[in-house]
Amino acid sequence: MKALTDRHDPARPEWTCTATEHPWPCTVARTALLAQFANDRRGLILHLGARLADAIDDFAAQTHGDVPPGLTDRFMGWVPELPEEPAEREGACASLRGPRKSIRAGDRAEAAALQKF
């Protein structure tokens, strides 16, 4: 048995919590991460995504390519979603529609130019 600490960090390569020996991130680690990244949800997702990639590499190396089921959900599934404002949704869709038209027109012009050759 390894020595437990007060820190809830991941113990690699098995990815258990150094304080509780539960799968990392444990409940305390999740709470601490939410507090640490309280105003930076994207930063939290990037941080957890990097840890997930490390965990996949570690597990794959230990098990000849096998990764535990539910690993992505364990690392990412608990991150709360941000409420989306209706105006933001409409704005995002409108901004996607605008450039798409100009891209299509550009594609047609490029295709016409290529047919000349």
Image (tube, rainbow, N blue to C red):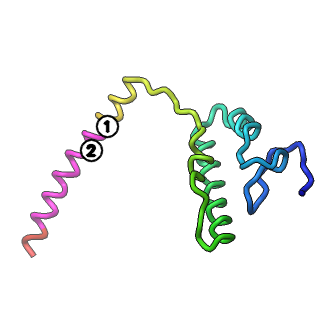
- Can you give x and y, in whole percent of width and height, for residue 96 in the image? 30, 41
Q: Badge 1 is on which residue?
A: 95
Residue 7, above or below 32: below
Query: What amino acid type should be assigned to the residue bearing mark 1?
Result: Ser
User: Residue 26 got which mark?
Assistant: none
Q: Residue at x 9, y 64 (%)?
A: 112
Magenta span of residues: 95-113
- Residue furthest top in the image: 86
- Can you give x and y, in whole percent of width and height, for residue 95 in the image? 31, 37
| Location of the C terminus (image quadrant) | bottom left
Query: What amino acid type should be assigned to the residue bearing mark 2?
Result: Pro
Tell whether position 114 is magenta.
Answer: no
Q: Residue at x 82, y 45 (%)?
A: 20
Tell whether position 97 is magenta.
Answer: yes
The answer to the question of whether label 1 and label 2 lie on touching residues, with beta carbons closer than 8 A, is: yes
Q: Badge 2 is on which residue?
A: 99
Q: Residue at x 16, y 51 (%)?
A: 105
Q: Decide which of 113, 79 is in the foreground and name it.
A: 79
Residue 58, above or below 24: below
Q: Which element type, helix, strand or loop, lies under badge 2?
A: helix
Q: Which element type, helix, strand or loop, lies under badge 1?
A: helix
- Residue furthest right in the image: 3
